[in-house]
């Protein structure tokens, strides 16, 4: 089973970062950019994917910091 990724999202007006599948956020507060940086550091440390969601909950950005299951086609 692949390790769980990190998700940065907004809930009730607060930006949060958590391990996907977890019921509670690991970090809460600050701006979207601040939480994105926290989530990026968490993802890098674990070698997993980081998903940053928009205010409406849709995916805004994804970055992989480990073995990317879908690497860019132009990177050979």
Image: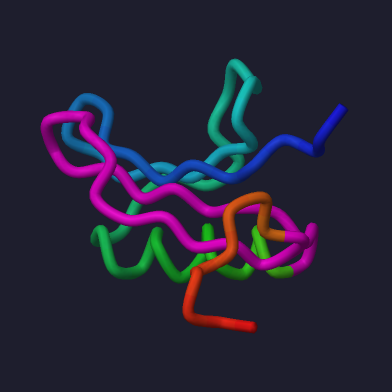
Q: Is residue 42 left or right of residue 72?
A: right
Q: For this rendering, which residue is in front, 52 or 13?
A: 52
Drawn side of residue 10 relative to residue 52, left or right: left
Quadrant position of the C terminus in the picture = bottom right
Indicate the position of residue 27 as horizontal and vertical percent values.
53, 47
Report x, y in % for residue 25. 54, 33
Q: How is the image coloured?
A: rainbow
Q: Which residues are magenta?
A: 45-67
Residue depicted at x 19% and y 43%: 54
The residue under the point 70% across, 54% down is 48
Q: Where 72 falls versus 76 (above or below)?
A: above
Q: Is residue 52 above or below residue 44?
A: above
Q: Position of residue 69 (x, y in %)?
A: 67, 50
Residue at the far left in the pictured view: 56
Residue at (41, 46) in percent of width and height: 8
Q: Nearer the viewer, residue 1 or 14?
A: 1
Query: How far from the left and from the top, in percent, is residue 75?
Result: 57, 82
Say which quarter of the image contains residue 18: top right
On screen, residue 53 above or below 32: above
Residue under the point 72% across and 35% down: 4
Q: Quadrant of the N terminus?
A: top right
- 76 inside magenta stretch: no
């Amino acid at each position: 089973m692949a390790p769980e990724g990190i998700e940065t999202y907004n809930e009730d007006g607060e930006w949060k970062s958590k391990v996907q599948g977890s019921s509670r956020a690991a970090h809460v507060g600050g701006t979207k950019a601040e939480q994105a940086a926290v989530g990026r550091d968490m993802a890098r440390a674990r070698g997993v994917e980081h998903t940053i969601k928009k205010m409406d909950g849709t995916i805004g950005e994804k970055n992989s910091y480990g073995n990317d299951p879908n690497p860019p086609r132009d990177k050979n």
